[in-house]
Image (cartoon, grey):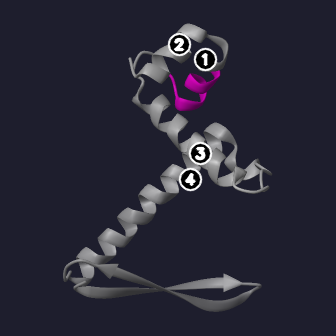
Amino acid sequence: MKAIGMTINLVKQNGKEASEVRYYIVSKYLTGRRFAEAVRGHWGIENSLHWQLDVTFGEHQSRIRKGHADINFSLLRRTSLSLLKNNKTARVGVKNKRLKAGRNDKYLLEVLLGK
């Protein structure tokens, strides 16, 4: 470990201003600008993934909570999302690729085999 970084975000909660502090461990020393770019880049990727999972699979609407089912289904959704994104045969969005795979066994096989 080389350095620990910190960000402070001002937010409004129940009409009052509050601050959130987040700590990051980084493997090398970074300038303030480079550190901020790395943090924004991380959250950009993270937000994009969650948005895609929610749009494609309705993840936020899921009520699966029993045992390890929520974790197992999350892994299945992420794997499915990756397979659908990697498929280049259909020139449509990921949500439509998912719907097409549900209706067309040949296309589903293409997605699963990575063709």
Point out residue 105 in the picture as x, y percentages from the top left corner: 60, 10
Q: Nearer the viewer, mark 2 or mark 1?
A: 2
Up/down of 18 relative to 113, above or below: below
Three-letter code for the amino acid on which mark 1 is drawn: Lys
Q: Which dot, 3 or 2, sits closer to the camera?
A: 2
Q: Which residue is drawn at 56% across and 53% down?
A: 50
For the residues labelled 2 and 1, the Cα–Cα distance comes to 7 Å
Residue named by callout 3: 53
Bin the neighbour count of mark 4 within 10 Å (Cα to Cα): few under 14, some 14-19, many 20 and up: some
Residue indicated by mark 4:
50
Q: Element type at marker 3? A: helix
The first of marks 4 and 1 along the sequence is: 4
Residue depicted at x 46% and y 31%: 83
Report which residue position mark 2 lands on.
107
The magenta-colored residue range is 92-100
State yes or no: residue 93 in magenta: yes
* Amino acid at pointer 3: Leu
**Which quadrant holds the C terminus?**
top left
Discs 3, 4 touching: Cβ within 8 Å: yes
